[in-house]
Image: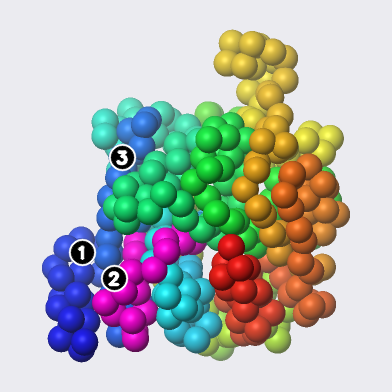
Amino acid sequence: MWLFLVLSVLASVATLSAQDISVANLVLRHGYPFDRHELTTEDGYVLSLFRIPFGRTDVRKLGPPVILQHGLQCSAACWIVSEPDKGLGFILADQGYDVWMPNNRGTTYSKKHRMLNPDSWFDEDKYWDFSFHELGFYDLAASIDYILKATGHSTLYYIGHSEGTTQFFALMSSRPTYNQKVIHMSALAPVAFMENISGPERFSTMYGSGLERFSKLFHSYSVFSGTLTHLLFKLLCNLNLTSQELCNHVIYLTSGQDPKQLNSTLIPTITSFVPAGTSIKQLVHYSQLAHNGGKFRQYDYGKPINKVIYRQDNPPEYDLSKVSTPVVLYHASNDWIADSMDVMKLCKQLPNCSMILISWPSFNHMDFMWGIDAWKLVYESIIEKLKRY
């Protein structure tokens, strides 16, 4: 058994590119196997998928596939920065699942295109011309098809966090046949309606149109997408105890106060991988959701362009009645981004939906991935639902 594991690890390392080595180390150092796969979407984006095919004990057995889809400014690495008893990627592998972790376009490990160069002045505007609609319609669809073909399964499980839930709902309502390929969906801090977003994030959404104008004026179409960003974040959060505490408060400002669930010793590792980069159009789209009268709809280009693209004045709303996959929405009362009122509105529009409120009163948006007690408060329930289905 151990020989098989060693050979699997060696084979995994041999296929990794230089940019993936640090991610591989997160997995391999704990005795898990690690694979990297690559696919090309219908519109030419080249995406990487990370895989933990089995846990540390059942090394010869491949279980049912499950997708772990990261959120905004994260990459697949966000699922595996914690120790094995707390990181959901590890926990699922040890529970007998074949764990697949896609990286959305424009993030650290998926910055290639069949024809476009994201760092080229001539290609930049075209490459970064995407929001969560494309992440669902193209990226998630391609990932599901690739995983099912690679594993020989006809269906899989899906777990998404934040933006990872938004793109799921966008895909399943736009291409309903994909509902037949997903057995069950666990939505952590689900985001579709954003009318009740609060905290500093509420303030930031007020400037979506200004951000769009800035982007075009200065020919800058992405945020936090360069290597320098990672170096600065890592440096600033490792200078001393004061700088680490400052980074802690940055997390609180974006997701809600919850110091008892934040493992501060994890911050240096987190800031090695976060932020992972995204398009400005993505941020603008979320800003639109917060200020469009409580609608979950496609990107609003303004009436003249909307008429050309959509053949109507306003962007079409996503028809959530077409999302037939069984869905559980996990939400928290201290989540400033996925407000419980918005989550309730979402559930009412989904045909097969239930809601679970996290019992910890101050549980916040990022605790779903890195909370000290996430295993007891969230993951046990997820695994119970997966086994039931």
Residue 250, above or below 176: below
Picture quadrant of residue 103: bottom left
Q: Which residue is mark 2?
A: 34
Near-viewer residue (26 or 119): 26
Please report contact status of discs 2 and 1: CB closer than 8 Å, yes or no.
yes
Give the amino acid at mark 2: Phe
Q: Position of residue 272 (x, y in %)?
A: 42, 71
State yes or no: discs 3 and 1 in contact (Cβ < 8 Å).
Answer: no
The numbered dot on residue 24 is: none
Numbered disc 3: secondary structure? strand
Bounds of the magenta segment: 50-68
Predominant SS of the magenta segment: loop
Residue at image location 26% in from the left, 31% down from the top? 115
Return the residue nearer the eye: 193 or 288: 193
Mark 2 vs 1, N-terminal side: 1
Figure check: 134 above or below 268: above
Give the amino acid type for the residue marked by disc 1 in the picture.
Answer: Leu
Q: Position of residue 5 (x, y in %)?
A: 22, 82
Query: Residue 55 colored magenta?
Result: yes
Quarter of the rendering containing residue 35: bottom left
